[in-house]
Amino acid sequence: MNITSRDVQTRGKNRYSFDEFLEKRSDLDWYKDDPFLQKALKKYADLQYEQIHKELLDFSPAVSSKWNTLAERAARPEVRPYMLHFDAFNHRIDRVVRPMETHQLEKEVFGAGLFSSQMTSWESFAKRMLIHQLGEAGVACPLTCTIGLIALLEQYPNEDIPELEQILQHTKEGLDGDFAIGAQFMTEIQGGSDLPANVLEAVSEGKNYRLYGNKFFCSVAHADYSVVTAKISGTDKVSTFIVPSWLPGDKEKEVRNGYEINRIKWKMGTAELPTGEFQYNGALAYPVGPAGKGVAVAVGIVLTLSRLEIGIACAGFMLRAAREASLYGDFRSVFGKKVKDYPLSARTLKKIENTAQRTAAGAFKIYDLFLRLNQPLNAGIPVDQPLEQRKQLFNLRELVLLQKICATNEGTEVLRDAISVFAGHGVMEEFSSLPRIFRDVAVNEQWEGPRNLLLTQIYRDIQRVANWYPPADFVANVLEGASQETIAGFSEQLTDLLQRPVCGEVSEASMEAAEEWDVFCDSFFKAYQTIALEELQ
């Protein structure tokens, strides 16, 4: 048989194409094509819904297409952030080098004015949930940190330091079209989440301070301003400060405000976000909030908002994972059937969708409580508030903590399950953004307090208020709308666990109690999320 050149060109050629899937995925509008998200927004935004809906229809195409493309390009390993410590003339500049895609994405995301007084809270919330579907992408953590910095400045205005008002305007409303970026640097090598162990020293210089020492884990290393905790010289109490990265006129010269960035961390996730180690050598710092109350201020305001935002982010991560897994399950055929038509795969897809919607519903419900309460950000629960108000503030405090640990834990499960729907293609990062987002969720689980730390805090919180807020009342209030049987069951479990050595010395009994406490918190919060989901349906 004679073999022609045409035979050689066509023999063995594989004509399989992913184009149908890719076209559908690229054509998706993450808001317009998500009736669940619209339903949740309609319930909670209420009379504002129609206007916000129009704004989101205009906003969403950029997130779903252009910004998503920028996020994917910025995630390439060869363009990850790095430090340029010196310029060509041996001047120390500590420039954080990031790809142009990240600069463009950051400019457009922050340029949307998400914190401006001109934007309603629910519009900002919904837009941020869409942005979080990009993954961290070098912008999600900066957004989160900026929220905390703005809230801190609004809570503690100080007319004696006009620079603080300028910083507030720069971050919230923008100056000449430029919106500043915030950060929060609290962790030191010896302490981690143990803020009272801080040793960074703040030395008084008139009404302001100079900082000396080291911060070991500083995300958003490229920020314009940062919230920093330190101990005022001669005291053992932590205070809170706002530190500009550059003093007026110095940003263009790349002359930093009395500090150096030693290096950029190598992290398993959120790789597009530069996280550094900072050495302060007399950085000018503006005090904010009451002196010596830095731990309460940082936890009650800044970390509370960060934890709240992590719950919103996890909902965004899961919604995207559910959408893309469903799309691929409907496209890909193996052994003569579509992936979605196998019972095991159908079960996985249904589980992913349900968890994503339950998490999103819970995030909406908690944020609604946050907005309805008067001044919910406090350094502790104010004792001068009416009892019912105190209870609601306490509910919010614990729900934010529960959401943080549960949503991040389920987030990794959902992303892993979604990746499995893609089989081998699921781990190919040029094929899908899900592996990148999976690592981002895993890192989010460690931000702002790891699981065991927050489980301990929740346990001690409930014990501490038991004299004015009985455990059974707490359960009944949080799970309002659940069956009496469900409420009674959780009340009995909580009452029993509070008598067990969950936080006692290590023993077989205490480890068993600790395991039961972990399971209880997970089940209790899922019950809350389920109520939130049922209220939407």
Image: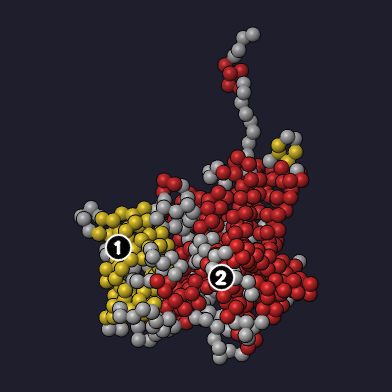
Q: Residue 218 location, x and y as percent?
A: 40, 63
How many numbered marks does the figure carry? 2
Element type at marker 1? strand
Which percent across, then down, holds residue 41?
A: 66, 69
Q: Earlier in the sequence, mark 1 or mark 2?
A: 1
| Label 1 vs label 2, nearer the camera | 2
Q: Is residue 530 left or right of residue 404?
A: right
Residue drawn at the location 46% of the way across and 67% of the way down: 193
Q: Which residue is mark 2?
A: 503
- Residue 426 percent coordinates (x, y): 59, 44
Please tell me the numbered disc located at residue 260.
1
Q: Quadrant of the C terminus?
A: bottom right
Q: Decide: is 429 above or below 497.
A: above
Q: Is residue 452 left or right of residue 323?
A: left
**Picture quarter with the N terminus:** top right
In this view, the residue in front, 91 or 259, is 259
Query: Which quadrant of the view contains residue 45?
Result: bottom right
Residue 491 seen in the figure: yes
**CA–CA distance in space, label 1 to label 2:** 40 Å
Secondary structure beneath dot 2 equals loop
Give, as a three-letter code, the residue at label 2: Cys
The picture places residue 84, in percent across and down from the top left corner, at 31, 54
Q: Is disc 2 surrounded by few (<14), some (14 to 19) or many (20+) residues within 10 Å? A: some
User: In this picture, is 293 found above or below 54?
Assistant: below
Q: What kind of residue is marked 1?
A: Glu
Q: Which residue is rendered at x = 41% and y = 52% of the image? A: 266
Q: Residue at x 55, y 57 (%)?
A: 441
